[in-house]
């Protein structure tokens, strides 16, 4: 099946497809960063929120009809979407709309990923879409969904699942597939204890990215059928996908880098350690995720702040007073006033006072680090003020006594202003 393409190389009929972004998860494993916000609204890379990557993928892929399904602690997420993503033209049937839980079909919260879509089925049907692209709002990656939609249409599949190889250990946290020689799915297991390895690679398995394309009518039929099954978890990976394999055509879409042909960059930032590692990827000399790629921009809300400023260059004496940043990302409005940042992400409007030291850390907006304070391997949430002389990330036991969260990999996490209130009084 051939498709006409417009001047930008995108499918001319792309407007017939709709993207659904599932953004309602609790994000329990990211606490305390998710105490007051949904996981997709957690800041990432200094200037972005996690959901910005999925939304930017949609925009860059030519998708202009986007529905975001929210649930828990959605105020911050909705505020961000209103600030950063309300530029599409409704008159041209382009939009990013937030769908809050309405309990139209029953009085329960969403029971699973499929139930979230099912409870909004009337709104989705009104789009008159040919295909529904279902996405997660809490993954970090860059992907051209147009290629997946093209393959889905050309193959005649009822469902297409984006996939990539992961280690067998990682496979325990994902849906794992077996496929035939044509890429058709023959078996699907959600979070198996012993994932089935690839035939030509005993150390890896084929994992679902949680990115699905459904024929719209087929999706509606399966959602309605699943709603009648007692004991169903109302989930795509646990119920709907395994049930339809064999009877219907379920196809894979291997997610590969266009240039190298290898598996492309994709990170599930569902835990504090994976979130920390994905951020630290960005400060390497040659990061796998290129934020400076002008052909695939990542859009977000940018505050009206002045450029970052680095002040003082007093190098005499035992303690130089120099505002510096090495191997770091420093965002607008930040002032390094005689403080030093190394291998760190400094978000907007952060202040590092004289002789402060920040290493291998992530500082959210409006964090203030006092004189002579030292921060290492830490995540500091928005608005936290670190008192002069305080050390964080150097002594895990002391950090625990101070009430901070310490991850399995030893990263110290300060969730909000209240975590340091007693030290600032």
Image (cartoon, helix red, strand yellow):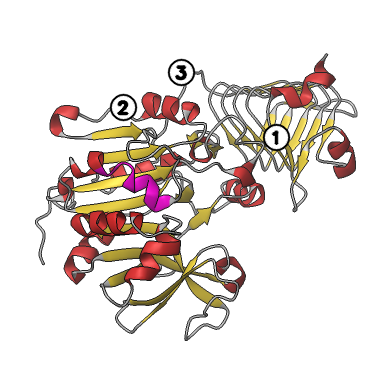
In the rendered view, tell whether residue 359 sits above or below residue 310: below
User: Residue 222 lies in what quarter of the image?
Assistant: bottom left
Q: What is the CA distance from the residue labelled 2 to the residue labelled 1? A: 34 Å
Q: Secondary structure at mark 2?
A: loop
Instruction: Out of 226 and 146, give the one closest to the viewer.
Output: 226
Tell me: 260 left or right of 126.
right
Name the residue tied to disc 2: 86
Residue 317: % across, % down: 89, 26
Q: Residue at x 55, y 68 (%)?
A: 171
Tell me: 80 left or right of 26.
left
Q: Residue at x 85, y 25 (%)?
A: 316
Which badge, 2 or 1, comes first in the chain's sequence? 2
Q: Residue at x 37, y 57 (%)?
A: 211
Instruction: Out of 397 and 372, give the one closest to the viewer.
Output: 397
Residue 95: in magenta span: no
| Disc 2 + disc 1, Cβ < 8 Å | no
Name the residue tied to disc 1: 341
Q: What is the CA distance from the residue labelled 2 to the residue labelled 3? A: 17 Å
Q: Which residues are magenta?
A: 113-121
User: Residue 116 lies in what quarter of the image?
Assistant: top left
């Amino acid at each position: 099946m051939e498709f006409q393409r417009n001047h930008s190389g995108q499918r001319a009929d792309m407007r017939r497809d709709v993207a659904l972004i599932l953004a309602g998860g609790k994000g329990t494993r990211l606490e305390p960063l998710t105490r007051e916000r949904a996981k997709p609204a957690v800041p990432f890379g200094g200037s972005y929120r996690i959901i910005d990557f999925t939304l930017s993928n949609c925009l860059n892929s030519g998708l202009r009809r986007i529905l975001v399904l929210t649930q828990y602690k959605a105020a911050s997420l909705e505020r961000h979407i209103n600030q950063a993503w309300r530029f599409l033209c409704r008159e041209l049937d382009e939009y990013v709309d937030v769908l809050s839980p309405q309990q139209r079909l029953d009085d329960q919260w969403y029971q699973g990923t499929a139930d979230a879509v099912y409870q909004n089925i009337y709104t989705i049907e009104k789009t008159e879409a040919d295909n529904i692209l279902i996405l997660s709002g809490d993954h970090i990656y860059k992907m051209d969904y147009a290629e997946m939609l093209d393959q889905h249409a050309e193959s005649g599949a009822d469902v297409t699942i984006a996939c990539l190889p992961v280690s067998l250990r990682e496979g325990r946290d994902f849906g794992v597939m077996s496929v035939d020689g044509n890429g058709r799915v023959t078996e699907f297991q959600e979070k198996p204890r012993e994932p089935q390895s690839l035939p030509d690679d005993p150390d890896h398995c084929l994992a679902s990215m949680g990115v699905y394309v459904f024929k719209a009518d087929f999706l509606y039929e399966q959602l309605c059928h699943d709603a009648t099954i007692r004991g169903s978890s109302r989930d795509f990976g646990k119920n709907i996908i395994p049930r339809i394999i064999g009877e219907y055509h379920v196809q894979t879409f291997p997610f590969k880098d266009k240039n190298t042909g290898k598996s492309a960059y994709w990170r599930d930032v569902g835990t504090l350690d994976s979130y920390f590692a994905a951020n630290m990827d960005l400060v390497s000399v040659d990061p796998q995720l290129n934020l400076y790629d002008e052909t695939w921009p990542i859009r977000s809300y940018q505050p009206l702040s002045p450029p970052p400023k680095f002040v003082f260059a007093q190098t005499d004496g035992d303690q130089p007073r120099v505002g510096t940043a090495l191997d770091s990302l420093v965002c607008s409005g930040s002032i390094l006033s005689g403080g030093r940042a190394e291998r760190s992400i400094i978000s907007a409007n952060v202040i590092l006072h004289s002789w402060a030291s920040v290493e291998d850390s992530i500082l959210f907006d409006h964090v203030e680090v006092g004189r002579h304070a030292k921060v290492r391997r830490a995540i500091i949430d928005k608005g936290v003020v670190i008192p002069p002389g305080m050390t964080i990330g150097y002594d895990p036991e002391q950090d625990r006594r101070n009430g901070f969260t310490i991850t399995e990999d030893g990263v110290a996490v300060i969730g909000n202003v209240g975590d340091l209130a007693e030290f600032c009084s």
